[in-house]
Image: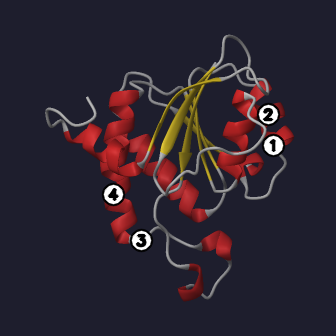
Amino acid sequence: MNLLLIRHAIAADRSDFESSDDLRPLTEEGKKKMQRAARGLRVAVPAIELLATSPLVRAVATGTIVEAAYADLRNPPVVREIDELRPGTEPADLLAWLDLQSADPVALVGHEPDLSELLARLVGAERPFHRFRKGGAAYVAFPGRVEEGAGTLSWALPPGLLRELGSGKKGGVR
């Protein structure tokens, strides 16, 4: 199995949002930047079988943008909201959920610092070594099922490089 880890796009500032943090939406800038980054994800990962998102509004909206980038495929990704990607959830719960999946690759849209901690566990690092920027992503390959320490980090890209990759311009990250 292979995993594409994606941090949600730019959301409304916590201090400017009066309602529950779970309901914080993406900003217009965040939506536009994520649309371009999602095109870059499509270049880097041509197909996704399963796209799972945290149930928080900003993650679901990011997942919808990523889903749209893959919508023209013969088999577009199946999309699910899962509590195992909710901020603060134990990584073991997410790993148990992943163990039940047969799709390959699986994309996960979540939050920091959870994604950094998950990435470290997946590749066998003692502590987080990569911080996901909003709209950034990483790709982890596994020789078989997803297990702690069994993954190999194929790449980790900040959102700006994903946007450049999706622009179709010659040079840059290609």
Instruction: Identify which residue, 131 or 76, lies in the foreground.
Output: 131
Tag 4, which secondary structure?
A: helix
Contact, mark 1 vs mark 2 (Cβ under 8 Å): yes
Identify which amino acid the numbered label 1 is placed on: Pro
Tag 1, which secondary structure?
A: helix
Give the CA distance from mark 4 to mark 2: 30 Å
The answer to whether residue 102 is visible is yes
Where does label 4 land, which residue?
33
Contact, mark 1 vs mark 4 (Cβ under 8 Å): no
Of badges 3 and 1, nearer the viewer stands: 1
Coordinates of residue 26 in the picture (x, y in percent): 46, 67
> For this view, does 141 lie left or right of residue 122?
left
Give the CA distance from mark 3 to mark 4: 10 Å
Where does label 3 land, which residue?
27
Give the CA distance from mark 1 to mark 4: 28 Å
Q: Tag 2 or tag 4, which sits nearer the N-term?
A: 4
The answer to whether residue 70 is visible is no
Tag 3, which secondary structure?
A: loop
Identify which amino acid the numbered label 2 is placed on: Leu
Badge 4 density bin: few <14, some 14–19, many ≥20, Cα 10 Å: some
Instruction: Identify which residue, 161 or 111, lies in the foreground.
Output: 161
Identify which amino acid the numbered label 3 is placed on: Thr
Where does label 1 land, which residue?
91
Badge 1 density bin: few <14, some 14–19, many ≥20, Cα 10 Å: some
Where does label 2 land, which residue?
95
Give the CA distance from mark 1 to mark 2: 6 Å
Contact, mark 4 vs mark 2 (Cβ under 8 Å): no
Query: What numbered label is drawn on residue 39?
Result: none
Contact, mark 3 vs mark 1 (Cβ under 8 Å): no
Coordinates of residue 59 in the picture (x, y in percent): 57, 56
